[in-house]
Amino acid sequence: MAFNLATILREAARSHPDKAALIVGGRPMTYAELAAACDRVAAGLLRAGIAPGDVVAVQLPNSVQFVVAYFAALRIGAVVVPMNPLYRADEIGTSRRSTGRRVAWTSRCTRPIPATRR
């Protein structure tokens, strides 16, 4: 198995499921909750046809959505290209041409990540 950031998150969720991974709206999001959200999004990426090795651009501000998108793409073996959310259209075009990205994840694609309390 490849050892990468997605593996580290999976191991943290297994070892410390109830510890806070993020603080979202003043409430802790545990490693187990974060891993579950990443698993749901990773499954959606696979259903959408994103495959290992595909380039996924993530153009989001610092948010739980960015963290989930980033780890979900890594989990399926995609290559993640973080992009500044303040990029203008010409900068986005340059990034698209230089990375060969298959999909872009922007703030228009996101919605709140629901908590999954046990």
Image (cartoon, helix red, strand yellow):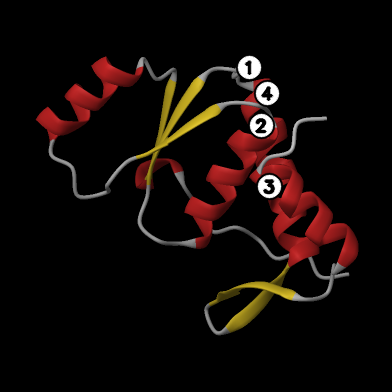
Marks 4/3: CA–CA distance: 12 Å
Marks 2/4: CA–CA distance: 5 Å
Q: Are marks 2 and 4 in contact (CB under 8 Å)?
A: yes
Q: Are marks 1 and 4 in contact (CB under 8 Å)?
A: yes
Q: Of the residues shown, which amino acid type is indicated by label 2?
A: Gly
What is the secondary structure assignment of the residue under circle 3?
helix
In this figure, which residue is indicated by the disc labeled 1? 51
Is residue 98 placed above or below 27 in the rendered structure?
above
Is residue 67 placed above or below 117 in the rendered structure?
above
Q: Residue at x 25, y 15 (%)?
A: 97
Q: Are marks 2 and 3 in contact (CB under 8 Å)?
A: no
Q: Are marks 4 and 3 in contact (CB under 8 Å)?
A: no
Residue at the far front in the pictured view: 3
Marks 2/3: CA–CA distance: 10 Å
Mark 2: few, some, or many residues within 10 Å (few <14, many ≥20)?
few
Mark 1: few, some, or many residues within 10 Å (few <14, many ≥20)?
some
Q: Of the residues shown, which amino acid type is indicated by label 3?
A: Cys
Give the mark toward the camera: 1 or 4: 1
Q: Residue at x 19, y 23 (%)?
A: 93
Residue 46 image label: 4
Marks 2/1: CA–CA distance: 11 Å
In this figure, which residue is indicated by the disc labeled 3? 38
Residue 83 image label: none
In this figure, which residue is indicated by the disc labeled 2? 44
Q: Nearer the viewer, residue 5 or 23?
A: 5
**Residue 87 figure quarter:** top left
Q: Is 113 left or right of 8, judged from the image as shown?
A: left
Q: Is 74 left or right of 17, judged from the image as shown?
A: left
